[in-house]
Image (cartoon, rainbow, N blue to C red):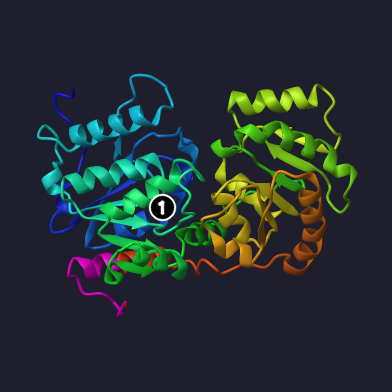
Amino acid sequence: MAENINIGLNPEEMKGKKVIVIIFGTRPEILKLFVLYRILKKSDEFYPLLYNTAQQKISGDILTKIGIHPDITAAEKPNRSSDLNELIAHLLTDFNEKFGEKSSVKKSDLHGIIVQGDTASAFSGALWGFLNQIPVFHAEAGLRTYDKLNPFPEEFMREAVARMTTLHFAPKGINRDNLIREGIKPENVFVIGNTINDAIFTLIKEKKIKEPKEKNYILSTFHRRENWGFVSDYARILNTVMNDISGYSEILHLMHPNPLIQRSFDEVMNGNGHPKLKIMNPIHDYFEMLGYVKNAGCILTDSGGLQEESLFFNVPCGVLRKTTERPEVLKKNAKLLPIDKPEITSFLTEAIDYRKVHQSKYNYTYGFGDSSYLIYELLKKFYGIQTEYSIM
């Protein structure tokens, strides 16, 4: 246990401000929160503290490029196990230590906690805040499939976070409706769009997106726990589908580091992969990854984040899942697909025309890049600070 913990707050900068802990532990979380952090950091009303749970290893290069430097990083876990029970227990203990009696910032100094999405970090942060009676603010609230095993364990975690949250920031009206139907008071739920659009608009403005040399390819990812039993089937489809379609240069499959997934692909390919199927390492550089999304002819994925990013760039997206917590994408650029070759082939063929029509157009389903500013204004209203304009 730590003897003394000096978080390094500047007492002068902190004076008279509301101290808000922003918790993140994965790349999607910080990318959806960095614009809000910048706004709070520049404000006269708030003093944000960035808390990195280190749930995933995040490239320091990414943090530097978006101007993010965590104030607090969780202690390293005793082991590298991916067991969620161990991770959550570890984080709850770490929160207690970082804001304990021997810390320069105690839990009594905190005015609020911001969590994002449905990760173990968000769940742990919300639980710790609730147990210590600190207001919890949830960004990307109200996403639901109502199937606790799809996606697992994210569906349970976001439902649980809702029970511990003070203010809910929902991307769309359907998310607000979900929360109200579950008994959340309407006056505590606000539709503000999705902060992913804030992030992408900011990176475009700052010219940080890296354009790949490849164009008009099929971009593929496949990793979700509920799909592990279908990895070999999907690998066979990728290895043969280019024989049945035209209009794409190649397939770029980003291989997940999970050994089970890698082994299944290796067994299917057996050294005889299709010449137009390129197996690539995961792209950890988000600015490069956005470039690959932007320039794809079509995307096949079971990822949640890629559903949002493909929508922004109007890239057709085959969602390799039974259901999605983002039903709005199904009305735009996306379609749910089984792991079935005829279905996937048909979608890839239809997607060619969609892409031609929507080439180089942005989609504003998730807002115009002002979601983080709306959260800032809502936080001011919550604390009784005068806002610049009326927010319902």
Is 159 placed above or below 369 here?
above
Q: State left or right for residue 182 relative to residue 98.
A: right
Count of residue discs: 1
Q: Residue at x 86, y 54 (%)?
A: 247
Report the residue marked by disc 1.
34
**Majority SS type along the magenta span:** loop
Q: Compare residues 218 and 339 and report the one nearer the observer.
A: 339
Stretch in magenta: 378-391
Q: Is residue 349 magenta?
A: no
Left or right relative to 84: residue 111 = left
Query: Is residue 166 visible in this depiction of the protein?
Result: yes
Q: Is residue 312 above or below residue 318?
A: below
Mark 1 neighbour class, 10 Å CA radius: few under 14, some 14 to 19, many 20 or more = many
Q: Which three-letter amino acid code belongs to the residue tagged 1?
A: Phe
Quadrant in which the C terminus is drawn: bottom left
Q: Position of residue 232 (x, y in %)?
A: 71, 31
Q: Secondary structure at mark 1?
A: helix
In the figure, residue 236 lies in which quadrant? top right
The image shows residue 241 at horizontal and vertical percentages of 83, 43
Does any portion of residue 255 appear in the rendered image? Answer: no
Q: Position of residue 305 (x, y in %)?
A: 54, 50
- Residue 327, horizontal then vertical, whole percent: 55, 62
Is 383 colored magenta in this rendering?
yes
288 with respect to 103 (left or right): right
Q: Residue furthest bottom?
A: 390
